[in-house]
Amino acid sequence: MPPARVLLLSRRSRPETQEVLAALPAAIAGYAEIVADIDVDDDPRPEINGADRAIVIGGDGTILSEARRFLDRDLPFIGVNVGRLGFLAEFDLDSLARHAAVVFGDHPPLRRCTVLAVTVRAADGTIRHDGVALNDCVVTAGRPFRMIELMLSADGAAGPVLNGDGVIISTPVGSTAYNVSAGGPIVHPAVDAIVVTPLAPHSLAFRPVVLPATAVLEIAITRPNESTSLVLDGQAALTLEIDDTVTIRRTPQHARLVVNPETSYWTILLEKMRWAAPPNYRDRGI
């Protein structure tokens, strides 16, 4: 079998990235060849030279930004973690080398990730913004940090009026990010769903809700602050205006992440998220 053709993506300014770059060729020797080597801070639309998968050296944020950038290329992404958490970037160099035959083979283990298409329309119907999100789409209050008012609807059916700090629309992969910090549920990536989680709602009864991924959501911006914003994956932001409408729907495309054969979603939750970690009980010597 010929070696896999790899697009290498990294942020060269980080010293820890340089260490991984130096050792990477030996880790993948015989299984993959690097056909394009790109600093993610450079060319916004580089040539990938026929690559059939991508290695991202970085943290989860780098994986999110590069998966969005190359979404139309349909590349499986292999994350080598040099960030803080590595929830999406499941490999280090040692595990990548151990599983190179599988990772760079014809049928690597993949996680198909829901991608959200996000469109902002002004009151006159003009499209102000089109974007995509792999983790989440957030409408956040912004300065001067007064309570804002939003009107939510799903599949054309009017929903609640939300008075609060905003709302998170999350994919299953993104459910362990901002969503879980705001009290939303953790959703396994294999579940075809979208999560709606309010931010500090002025209501005792406004709980997060899990909707089918086929749902089309609309958020009408009825009372914003001067810097109320739409934020995609914690990276791309747009200031919203009164009477804007944000429409969120699942795209036909999926982002594909190569998973580490040594791990499972269950163990990642336990080890990296410290899910269900008990209190620090005092040992009574019993």
Image (tube, rainbow, N blue to C red):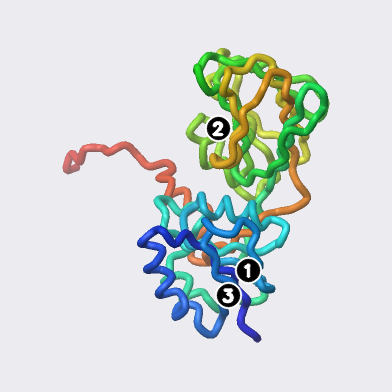
**Separation of disc 2 and disc 1 at Cα?**
33 Å
User: Real-space Cα distance between discs 1 and 3?
Assistant: 13 Å
- Tag 2 residue: 184
Q: Nearer the viewer, residue 224 or 75?
A: 224
- Tell me which corner region of the image, top left, top right, bottom left or bottom right, holds residue 158: top right
Picture layout, residue 236 above or below residue 75? above
Q: Earlier in the sequence, mark 1 or mark 3?
A: 1
Mark 1: amino acid: Arg
Q: Amino acid at mark 3?
A: Val
Q: Looking at the image, is mark 2 or mark 1 earlier in the sequence?
A: 1
Label 2, label 3: how far apart the Cα atoms are: 35 Å
In this rendering, position of residue 229 left or right of residue 158: left
Q: Position of residue 197 (x, y in %)?
A: 60, 29
Q: Work out which quarter of the rendered image holds the N terminus and state it.
A: bottom right
- Relative vertical location of residue 187 with respect to residue 107 in this rendering, above or below: above
What's the amino acid at mark 2? Gly
Q: Nearer the viewer, residue 260 or 116?
A: 116
Q: Which residue is mark 1?
A: 53
The image quadrant where one finds the C terminus is top left
Q: Nearer the viewer, mark 1 or mark 3?
A: 1
Numbered-mark total: 3
Residue in the image at 54% along x and 58% along y:
42
Residue 29's x, y, as percent?
Answer: 50, 83
Q: Report which residue position mark 3 lands on.
A: 102
Residue at (53, 76) in percent of width and height: 100
Q: Quadrant of residue 229?
A: top right
Task: Please give left or right for residue 24 compared with residue 190 in the image.
Answer: left
Residue at x-position 56% and y-position 23%: 227
Between 238 and 273, the one nearer to me in the picture: 238
Q: Is residue 29 above or below residue 167?
A: below
